[in-house]
Image (spheres, rainbow, N blue to C red):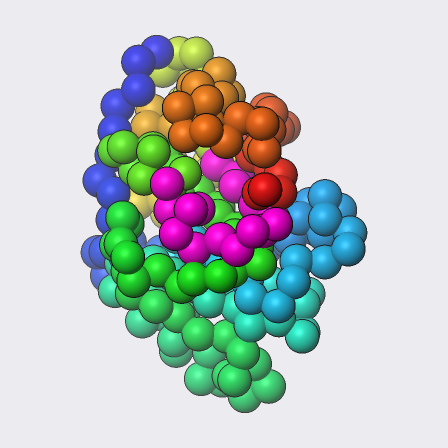
Amino acid sequence: MQRTPEPELMDGLEQARAYASADFSGSDQALVDRVAALFPSGLGSRLLDLGCGPGNISFRLADRYPQAEVIGVDGAAAMLALAEQQLQGLAPVLQRLRFQLCCLPSSDLPKACSAVVSNSLLHHLHDPQVLWSCLGLCAAPGAFVYVKDLRRPATAEAALALQRLHLADAPAVLQHDYIASLHAAFTPEEVQQQLQTAGLADQLQVAALEDRYLEVWGQLF
């Protein structure tokens, strides 16, 4: 099926609360475990979580890498408000985890990051090159990169089947957004072409993951 873009920002209060209260702990932990397996020597001292939403991955990165500064960036104020609320109850990480409101593309992104992680941001972007060009702004030479996102199924019927399989008991707003996200997602072949266009094909690789994801990983020159 053809790609159908969805809104770039998830800034509705009901939407933000639904995502913050949903239990994504399994997939969130799987992402951090996957990053640790791909880069066993560590991620360095300054980690950027692009499109952090309510901070689920940011908090887990701060827990996994206690010597690193972690910066979560998102363009949705409602999402970041929930992340900040949670952060205030975690005094041990207050000094090394922070959140920043920033819409891509932007020159205000944190610079010289030793690793850039992004979960479920790519499919929200109307122009996917925005994400790949941001790496040049925020990543230090030698930075590690890991991007995970949904991948677009072949048909609308396949998208509905994935929704029924994985979100059958989820709130209506999440079920609606899930279908929209599957329609807005890219295929691995499309992402490979994006990397070619961005001049990153020799530094990052892309592959399908499980029944509905794709992942991009590598180390920048």
Main SS of the magenta part reads: strand
The answer to whether residue 175 is seen in the rendering is no
Note whether residue 29 is visible: yes
x and y percent of residue 84 in the render? 38, 75
Q: In this view, does 164 lie above or below 15?
A: above
Q: Decide which of 94, 109 is in the foreground and name it.
A: 109
Which corner quadrant of the image does residue 66 belong to? Answer: bottom right
The quadrant of the image that shows the C terminus is top right
Q: Quadrant of residue 185?
A: top left
**Residue in the foreground of this view, choosing between 194 and 214:** 194
154 vs 61: above or below: above
| Residue 179 placement, left or right of 8 | right
In the picture, the quarter occupied by the N terminus is top left
Residue 143 lies in the magenta stretch: yes
On screen, residue 38 versus residue 3, left or right, reads right
Residue 79 is one of the magenta-drawn residues: no
Instruction: Residue at 49% x, 61% y: name it.
Output: 112
Residue for point 51% across, 83% down: 94
In percent of width and height, residue 69 lies at 56, 72
Number of marks in picture:
0
The image shows residue 118, relative to residue 101, as above or below, that is above
Tell me the residue at 72%/48% (across/down).
Answer: 39
Looking at the image, is 194 positioned above or below residue 93? above
* Residue at the (64%, 53%) spot, across then down: 32
> x, y percentage for residue 132?
41, 38
Q: Where is residue 214 in the image (x, y as percent from the top left)?
A: 54, 30
Closer to the camera, 195 or 172?
195
Residue stretch in magenta: 133-149
